[in-house]
Amino acid sequence: MKILVATEKPFAAAAVEGIKKEVEAAGNELVLLEKYTEKAQLLAAVADADARFVLVLVTTISTSLQLPLIT
């Protein structure tokens, strides 16, 4: 399973390593999209991801994309 973590501002290196370790230990692939500035970058990244974790600090972007939430 390809899991996308998309953030406008990067996570701390230790946090990324921890996430990567857990994702890969479960047999999944982690893909990072950090510091994206355009809506098109995010849309391209989510196109082939099986799961998404998107941290959006600007609510207008998250509401306009209508991304499904994973619970």
Image: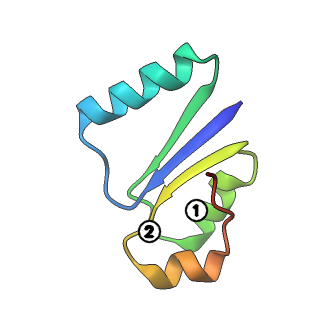
Q: Residue furthest front?
A: 71
Residue for point 67% across, 58% down = 44
| Residue named by callout 1 | 41
- For badge 2, the amino acid type reads Thr
Spatial separation of the CA atoms under disc 2 and disc 1: 7 Å
Tell me the element at label 1.
helix
Find residue 48 and report its horizontal and vertical position in percent.
75, 46
Q: Is residue 17 above or below residue 41?
A: above
Tell me, what colour scheme is on the image? rainbow
Find residue 13 and report its horizontal and vertical position in percent.
26, 34
Binning the other alpha carbons within 10 Å of mark 2 as few (below 14), some (14 to 19) or many (20 upward) gives few
- For badge 1, the amino acid type reads Gln
Number of numbered labels in the structure image: 2
Verify CB contact (< 8 Å) between mark 2 and mark 1: yes
Is residue 50 shown left or right of residue 12?
right
Tell me the element at label 2.
loop
Is residue 23 shown left or right of residue 14?
right
Residue for point 41% across, 30% down = 19
Say which mark, if any, is on residue 37.
2
Residue for point 61% across, 51% down = 71
Find residue 27 and report its horizontal and vertical position in percent.
64, 16
Nearer to us in this view, 43 or 4: 4
